[in-house]
Each structure stands twice: as structure tokens, then as C-alpha cells.
Amino acid sequence: MPYALFEDDERLTRSFATEQEAWEAAERAGLVELGAHGEKVLDNHLEIRPCEFSPDEVTDPGSDFILS
């Protein structure tokens, strides 16, 4: 199942094959912080969740985020 980074209901990234790959993209973008107990957390209003893969989706490995 593919995963992506969302802000509220807006999808911000291309789909990733695994949840771990989506977390890594968020880290590259500087959106991951350490929580009070040392756990990784996303900035406010962001979440990684399952998404639908679109066959016409641009999957440029050098670009994680969707630009509109």
C-alpha cells in the first residue's frame, strides 16, 4: 500500500512504496522533529497516511513533493 505526506486533507508528496520511505522524505524536507521522549514526530497538521497511487503520477525520484 502506498503512503504520502498530508497536511490536513491536502496531499503534499508523491506516493511512496512504504511508510518508512514517506518518513525519510519528510526528514529530508526538515519536517521531522524529536518529541518529548525522543520519538520522531511530524510538524503540526502533518501526517503520513495511506494513499491511492495514480498511474499518471510523476514519480521523479529527485522530487518528493508535489508542486502546483
Image (cartoon, rainbow, N blue to C red):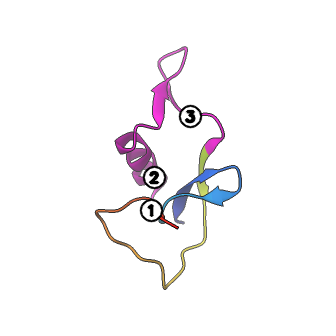
For badge 2, the amino acid type reads: Ala
Residue that numbered label 2 is attached to:
22
Taking 65 as reference, is 41 left or right? right
What residue is shown with label 1? Answer: 16
Q: CA distance from mark 3 to mark 1?
A: 19 Å
Which portion, as a residue range, is magenta? 18-46
**Mark 2 or mark 3, whichever is nearer to me:** 3
Give the residue type at disc 1. Phe
The percent position of residue 19, horizontal first and vertical second, equals 49, 52
Query: Along the polypeptide, which appears first: circle 2 or circle 1?
Result: 1
Q: Is residue 7 left or right of residue 35?
A: right
Question: Where residue 54 appears, x then y in whole percent?
Answer: 54, 79
Work out how far the residue at label 2 is from the one at label 1, CA to CA, in angstroms: 6 Å
Kindly report the distance in space between the C-alpha atoms of the residues bearing marks 2 and 3.
14 Å
Q: Residue furthest left?
A: 62
Say above or below: 24 vs 35: below
Give the residue at x 66% y 40%: 45
Residue drawn where x is 38% and y is 73% of the image = 59
Residue with the mark numbered 3: 43
Q: Nearer the viewer, residue 47 or 37?
A: 47
Q: Is residue 65 above or below residue 28?
A: below
Q: State the image coordinates of residue 43 (x, y, percent, origin top left).
A: 56, 34
Q: Quadrant of residue 51?
A: bottom right
Question: For the residue labelled by badge 3, is the local secondary structure a helix, a strand or a loop?
Answer: loop
Relative to 8, 37 lies left or right: left
Disc 3 residue crowd, few under 14, some 14–19, many 20+, Cα 10 Å: some
Q: Check the picture and name the quadrant holding the N terminus.
A: bottom right
